[in-house]
Image (cartoon, rainbow, N blue to C red):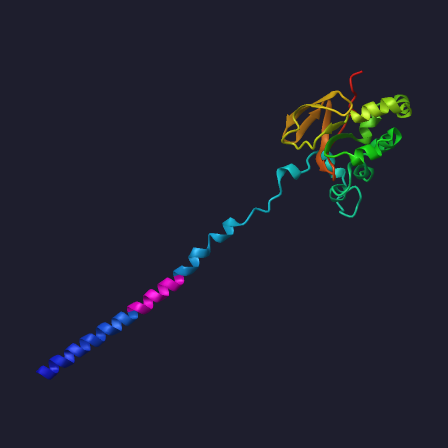
């Protein structure tokens, strides 16, 4: 009888040891499986790569800007050169470029540090009677006054463009609107927030005239 009891006890101990071993193996598996969950939060610490709204171009006229980055008139090419040089490659602004050259303002605009330019399109100049336009282009003083009225110190983004701004000419322009719909005096912005190396450009559909 004693031998039978000892055998039973030994068997019970062996069974307990076996169960403990199985339990330890399961715990080990659970621990190993749970470990990777502690690293899933890491990607949230990475900075966002989304572009800033202050860099976004807007307006129906932007569709006329070349998309090939190698084209001198593309947004990418214009962003790498100063404003007068950038305008010379833009197909919307050839008349403006002629006027800037006629007034001798190429170097002035290219060397300016952080400015905003309201750039009239070719169609904007066509609104001016041809005889009047020729007369203005031949009068350097008047032409300079008109062109510098389109330039404001500081790089104005869409977030801070609203309001009255003093121009290099000395007068003020008044910018109203919101979102993608803006007016500068009575001119509408057709392509906004165009970047050059030294300026923010807002292309407008009407030539701005300073008060005499």
Residue 129 in view in this figure: no
Magenta stretch: includes residue 30? yes
**Image point 22% across, 76% down: which residue?**
14
Residue range corresponding to the magenta coloring: 23-33
56, 100: nearer the viewer: 100
**Image point 42% across, 57% down: which residue?**
37
Residue 78 in view in this figure: yes
Q: Is residue 1 left or right of residue 10?
A: left
Q: Is residue 140 left or right of residue 59?
A: right
Q: Is residue 173 left or right of residue 46?
A: right
Across and down, in percent, residue 105 comes to 84, 31
Magenta stretch: includes residue 183? no
Q: Quadrant of residue 193?
A: top right
Q: Where the C terminus falls, by quadrant?
A: top right
Main structural element of the magenta stretch: helix, strand or loop?
helix
Specify the farthest residue to the left: 1
Say if 196 sits above or below 43 in the image.
Answer: above
Total marks placed: 0
Q: Quadrant of residue 171?
A: top right
């Amino acid at each position: 009888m004693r031998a039978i009891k000892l055998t039973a006890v030994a068997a019970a101990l062996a069974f307990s040891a076996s169960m403990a071993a199985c339990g330890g193996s399961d715990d080990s598996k659970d621990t190993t499986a749970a470990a990777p969950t502690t690293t899933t939060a890491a990607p949230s610490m990475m900075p966002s790569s989304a572009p800033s709204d202050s860099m976004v171009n807007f307006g129906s006229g932007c569709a006329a800007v070349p998309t090939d980055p190698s084209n001198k008139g593309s947004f990418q090419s214009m962003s790498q050169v100063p404003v007068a040089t950038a305008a010379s490659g833009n197909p919307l602004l050839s008349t403006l470029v002629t006027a800037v050259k006629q007034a001798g303002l190429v170097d002035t605009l290219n060397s300016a540090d952080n400015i905003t330019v309201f750039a009239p399109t070719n169609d904007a100049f066509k609104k001016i009677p041809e005889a009047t336009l020729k007369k203005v282009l031949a009068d350097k003083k008047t032409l300079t006054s008109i062109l510098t009225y389109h330039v404001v110190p500081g790089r104005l983004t869409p977030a801070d463009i609203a309001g009255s701004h003093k121009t290099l000419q000395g007068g003020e322009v008044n910018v109203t609107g919101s979102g993608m719909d803006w007016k500068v005096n009575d001119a509408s912005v057709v392509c906004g927030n165009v970047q050059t190396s030294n300026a923010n450009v807002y292309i407008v559909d009407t030539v701005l005239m300073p008060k005499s």
